[in-house]
Amino acid sequence: MGLKDVFVKNLKKYRKEKKVSQMALAELCGTSTSYIGQIEIGNRFPSIDMIEKIAEALQIKPYLLFFTENGNELTETKPPAKKESLSDATKDDLIKRLTDAVRRVVKRTNINL
């Protein structure tokens, strides 16, 4: 389960435990009910400031919205599996493209390096 999914699950859980409707949560956070609904269905993700407002409204610590339950114990979510690294040829190609792009920008702006 990804971090976004964990957040959504916990938001719903804590909101329902506290018996706070989406409308009441929205009012407490100074936002719209539809925005809270969009967060809860995973279509939107709140800013850090909004996460803090949500946690304050639910009277919980913000980090609790990012933990998963493992039995009765809260544990941190596992990071996603490491993706394969780029091949040397791909890295070389990317470096060449980036270098060429920087040279074009420098040439257009007449910067002396």
Image: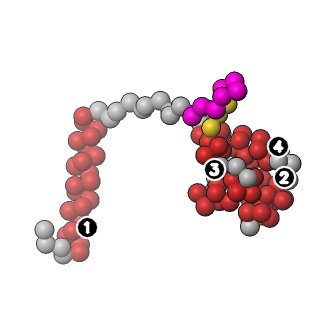
- Res 25 visible: yes
Which callout, 4 or 1, points at the residue further toward the start of the chain?
4
Question: In what quadrant of the picture does the N terminus appear?
Answer: top right
- Region in magenta: 70-77
**Is the residue marked by circle 3 packed among few (<14), some (14-19), or many (20+) residues within 10 Å?**
some
Callout 1 amino acid: Val
Is-magenta flag for residue 73? yes
- Tell me whether circle 4 and circle 3 mark residues in contact (CB < 8 Å): no
Q: Toward the viewer: 90 or 65?
A: 65
Secondary structure state at the residue bearing disc 1: helix
- C-alpha span from label 2 to label 4: 8 Å
- Tell me whether circle 1 and circle 2 mark residues in contact (CB < 8 Å): no
Image coordinates for residue 31, horizontal then vertical, percent: 74, 65
- C-alpha span from label 2 to label 3: 17 Å
Callout 4 amino acid: Glu
- C-alpha span from label 1 to label 2: 53 Å
Please give the residue where the numbered disc 1 appears in the rendered image.
105
Please give the residue where the numbered disc 3 appears in the rendered image.
62
Residue occupying image coordinates x 13% and y 72%: 112
Q: Nearer the viewer, mark 1 or mark 3?
A: 3
**Is the residue marked by circle 1 packed among few (<14), some (14-19), or many (20+) residues within 10 Å?**
few
Please give the residue where the numbered disc 4 appears in the rendered image.
17
Please give the residue where the numbered disc 2 appears in the rendered image.
20
Residue occupying image coordinates x 65% and y 49%: 61
Callout 2 amino acid: Val
Which callout, 1 or 2, points at the residue further toward the start of the chain?
2
Which callout, 4 or 3, points at the residue further toward the start of the chain?
4
Secondary structure state at the residue bearing disc 3: helix
Which corner quadrant of the image does residue 100 belong to?
Answer: bottom left
